[in-house]
Image: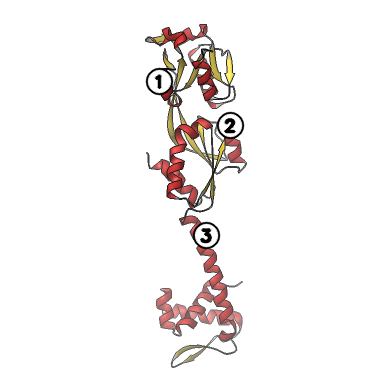
Amino acid sequence: MANLELYRVFYTVAKCGSLTKAAEELYISQPAVSQSVKQLENQLGISLFNRTHRGMELSAQGGKLIFSRVEQALSLIDEAENMIAQLNTSATGTIRIGASDMIFEYFLADKIVEYHEKFPAVKIELLSDLSPRTLEALKANRCDVCFVNLPIALDPELSVHGNCMRLTDIFITNEKHIELTRGVIPLARLQDYPLIFLEQGTVARKSLTNFLENVGIDLKPSIEIGSWDLMKRLVIRGMGIGCIPREYTLHRLADKSLYEIKTDPPLPARAVGMVLPKNAQIPYALRAFIELFQEDR
């Protein structure tokens, strides 16, 4: 099997015409250079150089025959290494980001714009879906990174990277049930009102269900939906009381189209987390995007 380093030494000696100069360029000792040349000559069964008082000259029936091919081969290898290095040190290509509509709108939008301004050559593909289906897309290699509502079940194929955004679930109403917004009410009191929850199977719904079971309160929704935006519209129209992260409805709370209901006990805080395939190689373009979130910590 060919030893690439032996050929690199041969090429350097031929280019420099001197063992001493080749040793200086390769940052190794002169005896090591001489030994490498002899080793390659023994492997090939030919003499590659003529040793003269002027230095090292390529032999007509050895070194001159292979020099151009070795030079071409080493150039191709260097080109390949440079291509790999470029992937690891420059932002090019495509990154595919998965998240829900609300996470894109309230958390990722500004980061995506910031990233695009820094790296306009990178193509950005967005996959919008609920957290469980976003995780499935990540495992199926349909996206490179995803941002989901936590907590999620442990998965040996996935690596969860911290809490990127805090979510505080609250109950909301319009003026129809304004009496619920005066002070703090017992959480169980909401059993007497029509409730609008996110559909079963979502991370948010599972978190709410687990909390209610732990505190021994049974709240059954009148309506189950798959969209936070639809929930807000239905609550504004007086269809019932919703349960939504406060961070997703700040503008509605500010303009008084929705009101927060404070309960005892309050709903626990959750978070948005970043998820990557475990042990996956992360190219520079994706690594640069991930670092935007690490800068905020």
| Residue occupying the point 40% across, 42% down | 294
Q: Which residue is rendered at x = 51% and y = 56% of the image?
A: 87
Which disc is residue 119 wearing?
none
Above or below 219: residue 284: below
Mark 1 surroundings within 10 Å by alpha-carbon count, few (fewer than 14), some (14 through 19), many (20 or more): few
Up the image or down, 212 lies above or below 162; here it is above
Say how the picture is coloured: secondary structure
Query: Mark 3: which amino acid?
Result: Ile
What residue is shown at x 43% (from left), y 47% (from top)? 117
> Which quarter of the rendering shows the C terminus?
top left
The answer to whether residue 278 is visible is no
Mark 3 vs mark 1: which is more N-terminal?
3
Does the image show residue 171? yes
- Would you place residue 88 above or below residue 80 in this image? above
Quadrant assignment, res 71: bottom right
Where's residue 134, x and y in %?
57, 35
Q: Position of residue 82 (x, y in %)?
A: 50, 64
Task: Give the amino acid type for the residue marked by disc 2 in the picture.
Answer: Pro
| Mark earlier in primary sequence (2, 3) | 3
Residue carrying label 2: 132
Which label belongs to residue 255? 1
Please name the residue shown 59% across and 79% down the image. Answer: 43
SS assignment at label 2: helix
N-terminal of the pair, mark 2 or mark 1, is: 2
Q: Which residue is mark 3?
A: 84
